[in-house]
Image: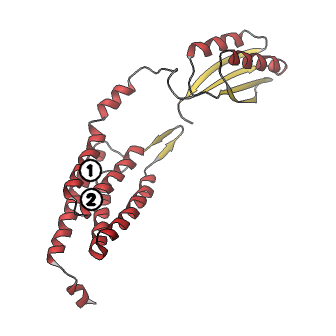
Amino acid sequence: MSFAALSNFDPPQFVNTIVSLATAFVLGTAIGAERQWRQRTAGLRTAALVAVGAAAFVDIGMRLGGNAAASHVLAYVVSGVGFLGAGVIMKEGLNIRGLNTAATLWGAAATGGAAGADLIVEAVVIAVFVLGANTALRPLVDVINRQPLDEATTEATYDIRVTVTPDDLPEVRSALLDQLEAKAYAVRQTSVQEQAEDMLELAVTLAGSSARSADLDAVIASVEALPGVDHASWAMRTAD
């Protein structure tokens, strides 16, 4: 076994492997440094290890089976990094965090894969684009996020809730649905839940993904004037 290991040692190929791994390490470190600076879940070491690991697997595939084998290995690297990226995605209530970091790990793997395939210039270009997406696009994201929210063009879920007495529920529900229909708002679902002090809560979810606040305000004002209604309101959810 030792003689086989010595016979397989090829100095030029060994130097080529060192160059590929070193390139992946440097570029992965650059990508990870940005994540570490912003205190994200997967930082400098994770991105560097992903890039080096991808480069190592692709380089081994090329050494053993040429470009065809390297392509197969790279396909498995892509799927494997997908599972790794899922580990940094966290759901907190209606918010999901870590998607950008997971995508960055994918970019680090692409950088390492290119380096392992001896595409050094391409690996540098990929790393530049990944860093550009995380840095150069940030001001644009801030500008977009600071824009006033337009309910008429924002895709969301709209809920109307009415607190009403049990005896007046049928009439109020019918009046609410009629008003929504008159304003061309379709209803996805309705539900009724018991509230304290012999009151019921009628919940109506609109089927459309956009609505005008003035229309919904008018509907709420009309419903609140009906007998038996204690309170009525509407709310918009931008995520389920």
Residue 164 or 150: which is nearer the viewer? 150
The residue depicted at 26 percent of the width and 36 percent of the height is 136
Q: Amino acid at mark 2?
A: Ala
**Picture coordinates of residue 1 (x, y %)?**
28, 90
Colour mapping used in the image: secondary structure
Q: Are marks 2 and 1 in contact (CB under 8 Å)?
A: yes
Element marked by disc 2: helix
Label for residue 114?
2
Q: Marks 2 and 1, how far apart in space?
A: 9 Å
Vertical side of 232 occupied by 120: above or below = below
Extreme residue toward the front, this view: 68
Looking at the rendered structure, the kind of residue marked 1 is: Ile
Residue beneath the point at 81% across and 17% down: 171
Say which label, 2 or 1, has the lower sequence index. 2
> How dense is the environment of label 1, judged by Cα within 10 Å: few (below 14), some, or many (20 and up)?
some
Q: Position of residue 146 (x, y in %)?
A: 38, 23
Q: Which residue is mark 1?
A: 126
